[in-house]
Image (cartoon, rainbow, N blue to C red):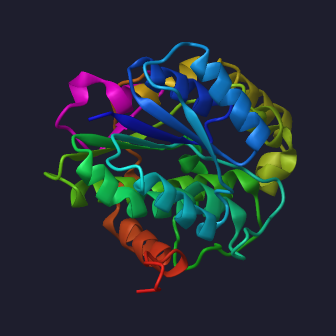
């Protein structure tokens, strides 16, 4: 049986490096992204490395839940899935709404990978032993921990809201690992640390992304951001590749793979059952798992 992998936001940066690494292990890789031209170029660059199976590109707006459902159907139609890497991530200096009218940071960083993963669970079970890798972030430390609603009270600050969405996704990841134990589907979170990407070289240099208190120290905050995001994407992709392929993880699940590509302790907030339950309720309400008939 051909072993397959899907990498979201895989046309550049950490996602592309992850896709290249997975292709090098013999997996047939599908790269998912929004821009068709960039997707074509990304696949051409992967295929230039002469992988065992040619890569392909699927164009999808991952901020749209309906588009995610269509994507899941296309992937599921191919049969069993071996590896799913939810690499998608976005931070916004100003509040934006997704195509579904949901705050965009929460929609892209949590609801999109949540929905895609849930819809592809039958394919992953069929491809077992298989792995799910959700890319997390150290920005979790700046997150508000309330999930009674999609938007927490107070002003919008992109870095903090990004961290909150990543916290939601990490709590979901750990809960999913427990749910899928003994199914042959292992679930991991991978923290890339920092790398020079479009997001870190753009959005993260805008003082609007942090709360007013931190803006008072913006020169210091900015230097810290710049130091932590100056490395190459190829290094930042190593935790995802380790989680997706390393033999030492066979039979294990529910681990966070840190920036040095070995397991680390998850944040305490992500292991709080109250957070996990609130995230579950909110996710199911905003992105219901349904068939085309609406059942």
Residue for point 20% across, 38% down: 252
Res. 171 in view: no
Query: Does residue 239 appear to the left or right of 228 in the view shown?
Result: left
At x 37%, y 32%, the residue is 244
From the viewer's perspective, is 131 left or right of 146? Answer: left
Of 260 and 293, nearer the camera is 293
> Residue 269: image x %, image y %?
42, 56
**Residue 278 percent location from the top left of the image:** 43, 74
Tell me, yes or no, whether the highlighted magenta stretch contains residue 186: no
Decide if residue 201 is in sight here. yes
Height in image: 74 above or below 240? below
Assign the N terminus to one quadrant of the image: top left
Q: Residue furthest top?
A: 49
Question: Which image quadrant is residue 286 in?
Answer: bottom right
**Residue at horizontal 27 percent and vertical 45 percent from the top:** 127
Span highlighted in magenta in the image: 242-260
Total count of labels: 0
Residue 48: x and y in percent read 61, 15
In the image, residue 210 sits, relative to residue 223, either above or below, namely below
Name the residue nearer the viewer: 234 or 289.
289
Q: Nearer the viewer, residue 277 or 246?
A: 246
In the image, farthest residue toward the left:
182
Q: Is residue 198 above or below residue 148?
A: above
Instruction: Confirm whether the magenta stretch covers residue 245.
Output: yes
Q: Does residue 19 appear to the left or right of 83 in the view shown?
A: right
| Residue at horizontal 81 percent and vertical 43 percent from the top | 203
Quarter of the image with the C terminus in it:
bottom left
Estimate the x, y position of residue 120 in percent, counting from the top left: 39, 57
Name the foreground residue: 18 vs 152.
Answer: 18
Tell me which corner region of the image, top left, top right, bottom left or bottom right, holds residue 248: top left
């Amino acid at each position: 049986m051909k072993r397959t992998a899907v990498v979201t936001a895989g046309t550049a940066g950490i996602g592309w490096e992850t896709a290249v690494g997975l292709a090098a292990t013999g997996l047939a890789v599908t790269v998912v992204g929004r821009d068709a031209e960039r997707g074509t170029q990304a696949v051409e660059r992967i295929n230039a490395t002469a992988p065992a199976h040619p890569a392909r590109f699927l164009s999808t707006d991952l901020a749209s839940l309906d588009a995610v459902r269509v994507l899941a159907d296309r992937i599921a139609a191919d049969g069993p899935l071996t590896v799913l890497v939810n690499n998608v991530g976005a931070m916004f200096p100003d509040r934006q709404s997704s195509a579904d009218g949901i705050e965009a940071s929460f929609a892209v960083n949590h609801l999109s990978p949540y929905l895609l993963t849930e819809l592809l669970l039958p394919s992953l079970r069929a491809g077992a032993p298989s792995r799910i890798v959700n890319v997390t972030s150290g920005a979790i430390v700046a997150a508000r921990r309330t999930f009674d609603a999609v938007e927490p009270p107070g002003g919008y600050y992109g870095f903090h809201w990004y961290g909150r969405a990543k916290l939601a996704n990490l709590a979901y990841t750990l809960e999913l690992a427990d749910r899928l134990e003994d199914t042959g589907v292992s679930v991991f979170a991978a923290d890339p640390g920092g790398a020079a990407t479009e997001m870190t070289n753009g959005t993260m240099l805008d003082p609007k992304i942090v709360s007013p208190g931190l803006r008072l120290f913006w020169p210091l905050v900015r230097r810290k951001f710049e130091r932590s995001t100056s490395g190459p994407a190829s290094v930042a992709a190593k935790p995802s590749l380790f989680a997706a392929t390393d033999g030492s993880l066979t039979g294990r699940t529910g681990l966070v793979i840190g920036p040095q590509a070995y397991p680390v302790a998850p944040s305490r907030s992500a292991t709080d059952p109250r957070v996990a339950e609130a995230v579950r309720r909110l996710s199911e309400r905003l992105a219901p798992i349904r068939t085309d008939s609406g059942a």
